[in-house]
Image (cartoon, coloured by chain):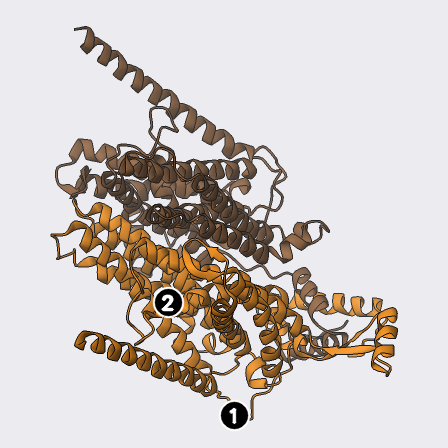
Chain colours: A brown, B orange
Amino acid sequence: MDLAQAEKSKKLQNALTRTVWTVIMIGGFLGLLAMGHVYMIILVMLCQTLVYREVTSLFSLKRKGDTGETPGRDPWSKTLNWYFFAVTNYFLYGESIIHYFKHVVFSDAQLAPFATNHRMISFALYTIGFVGFVMSLQRGYLKQQFGLFCWVHMTLLLIVVSSHFIVNNILEGMIWFWVPASLVICNDVFAYIWGITLGRTPLIKLSPKKTVEGFVGAFFSTVVFGIIWGTFFMRFDYMICPVRELGVSAFDTTVHCKPNPVFVWRDWNIPAPLSALLSTLLGRAITSIPYAPYQIHLFFMACFASLVAPFGGFFASGFKRAFNIKDFGHSIPGHGGMTDRMDCQFLMGVFTYVYYSNLIRETHVTVGSVLQTIVNGLTFHEQMELIADLKRYLEGQGIRVNV
Amino acid sequence: MDLAQAEKSKKLQNALTRTVWTVIMIGGFLGLLAMGHVYMIILVMLCQTLVYREVTSLFSLKRKGDTGETPGRDPWSKTLNWYFFAVTNYFLYGESIIHYFKHVVFSDAQLAPFATNHRMISFALYTIGFVGFVMSLQRGYLKQQFGLFCWVHMTLLLIVVSSHFIVNNILEGMIWFWVPASLVICNDVFAYIWGITLGRTPLIKLSPKKTVEGFVGAFFSTVVFGIIWGTFFMRFDYMICPVRELGVSAFDTTVHCKPNPVFVWRDWNIPAPLSALLSTLLGRAITSIPYAPYQIHLFFMACFASLVAPFGGFFASGFKRAFNIKDFGHSIPGHGGMTDRMDCQFLMGVFTYVYYSNLIRETHVTVGSVLQTIVNGLTFHEQMELIADLKRYLEGQGIRVNV
């Protein structure tokens, strides 16, 4: 009796912890969203660090169990793990900073040499780690050391590189991070809801709890939710403007930019027969429907979030099963490890970045940027030649140049 | 007696095979060097394919031994290995082709859509592989499958990515591939020669045959050889010109380009006291010494080839020891696997690329390229603004613009 009661009280305690921490997480997330891009980036970096710690510690845990009697592992491994983590972050965040804050970085006399030689420095740092690894090789530990080396690189590739793209999304405009992340969470929640209400057919052998009904139901729910959610947020300049300076929060009324054309409403002219039909049905003339191209992109992002991103979760499930663990860690009380909450976010973040940079981003050519290229890269003679060529081109287009 | 004789004859046979194949390799290499860049690139791709096959087959071999009684492995693995290999190559070589042959790719109506959406297509192809991997997961094979997945990614990262940089080096000018590759081979040979003649002190525990004397001797020999070797080849336009069109061979007399400034001879003015000293010693006035900046770069490349690149070899040695194998394979008769010959080349290739692109490559801004940017990216109004701005800038520099 006492035991049953103790267990019941423990379960209640767990549920309470889980609820409290869910509220804390959502509140914290919203708070950071409003506080500004820097805080969001710090959050992403914190998450990736926790995930990296969880995943790499898994390896050494497993190894400890394997060898049984060697509790003291070679001291280099942990240092090297974190060294490679630091170097990868230095390289990737350096790339982002140089790309997004060119004007700041190259005009600062102390930062400029780091910016110009960034890849060289990163390569040198990596090489030091590589040489350090080779020097740390010890007979009897070789298989373990190479295994860990492989493992660390894999984790860096899948987690740190993904996080880097997520940070780039934040810098391209908060909406490119906020909406995709919401889509994944929404899909998770709806898969659960549809699964427990209608779920019958098992979806994948590895996760017996996942059902086809949940998967399909979540797909439709996510598409509907995604289009509404995205349409709501695209009205705020704070959400859609790329970051120009980092000190901005949601409460600044100074954030303005010329919105990317995908956020601009336009009219879709309904084909005549359909228009006639609709007009008859509704009793008034309807010839066009307003829409923003972003809504079409929202549809594709929702599709990815509900049809492909879950495979990131299946991957993590299979992985946990392979290593016989329930959770990746205990970073979040009541929720297991950070990795358990982030598994689908990485895939979604990379997709968003590739999709955005390929189909949506505008390459901003401005008079200023071209002028900079010309002044730095061409001789005076070539500059005069350029003026003559450009004038000829404009006159060929029927435009009188009077400068 | 018969046995000893058989063994002796086998050894002789081996030595013969090895010599014959060494000659074939050197001859083939020189032949391909002369035949043109395309053949060299094909050679690099062939080498990386062989290395990839050797390294990934190692994993399945090892696994077979581990489980003992399961000779039939899940059929997906091999297909997936080569699928990921193909996708990585598609992505990386696509990037190179788009970068180096912009003018061809974007003006071709059939290639242009592939070029503009290259990253999107590559990501989609990778995602298909990822989903395929998750779908192929089977209980009881999980650890093995995740192990192979990790292994494949590691190999792709270390080998295919490196080869991609080596191919870029070829495209930047044959000398950026030919001289670094020679430096590594030269260092290997001299380390062996100095090692067997003077070698006493062991260098690294893992490879008892390597000695400090060999390492240090090879360093000095490689620096001297490198500067002479590089200085000899920098006189040929075929070696130093970046690739503009692929159909060119060493026998074409049409290859010409404005050489990168590092290949242009200049004079180093000897400081007065030293000059006076030298003049007294030599009996004639010496005030300057001719040099090309490339020779200084050769020094640094030789340093890397002899001080850092060998760690690529130590890495491979440690690896072979960890898995208890003598060679990676039997691709080259008498020489073991391709991997055994290539281990240091990858590290050297990446170094050369980073070093070259950071310190030597000139970003070519031409009147034509700027004009293209202007015409595509600016409105007529902005173009006129640019002309006015540029004119003002030139006049500020004291230059009369009369167009």
- The quadrant the C terminus of chain A occupies is bottom right
Mark 1 or 2, nearer chain start: 1
> Is residue B225 visible to us here?
yes
The Cα–Cα distance between marks 1 and 2, rounded to whole angstroms, is 35 Å
| Residue A334 vertical placement versus A210 (above, below) | above
Element type where label 2 sits in the image: helix
Q: Is residue A328 left or right of residue A178?
A: left
Which residue is at 16% across, 6% downward?
A: A1
Which residue is at 50% across, 56% downward?
A: A361
Numbered circles on residues, count: 2
**In the image, what residue type sits under mark 1?**
Asp
| Residue A116 vertical placement versus A198 (above, below) | below
The image shows residue B36 at horizontal and vertical percentages of: 46, 85
**Quarter of image, res B32:** bottom left
Q: Are marks 1 and 2 on the same chain?
A: yes
Residue at image mark 2: B340
Pointer 2 chain:
B
Q: Is residue B140 left or right of residue A255?
A: left
Q: Nearer the viewer, residue A14 or A113?
A: A113
Element type where label 1 sits in the image: loop
Q: Which mark is residue A306?
A: none
**In the image, what residue type sits under mark 2?**
Asp
The image shows residue A373 at horizontal and vertical percentages of: 67, 66
Q: Residues within 10 Å of mark 2 (few under 14, many from 20)?
A: many
The image shows residue B288 at horizontal and vertical percentages of: 81, 77
The image shows residue A388 at horizontal and vertical percentages of: 72, 79
Q: Is residue A258 left or right of residue A333?
A: right
Which residue is at 41% across, 54% downward?
A: B206
Q: Which mark is residue B252?
A: 1
Q: Nearer the viewer, residue A3 or B313?
A: B313
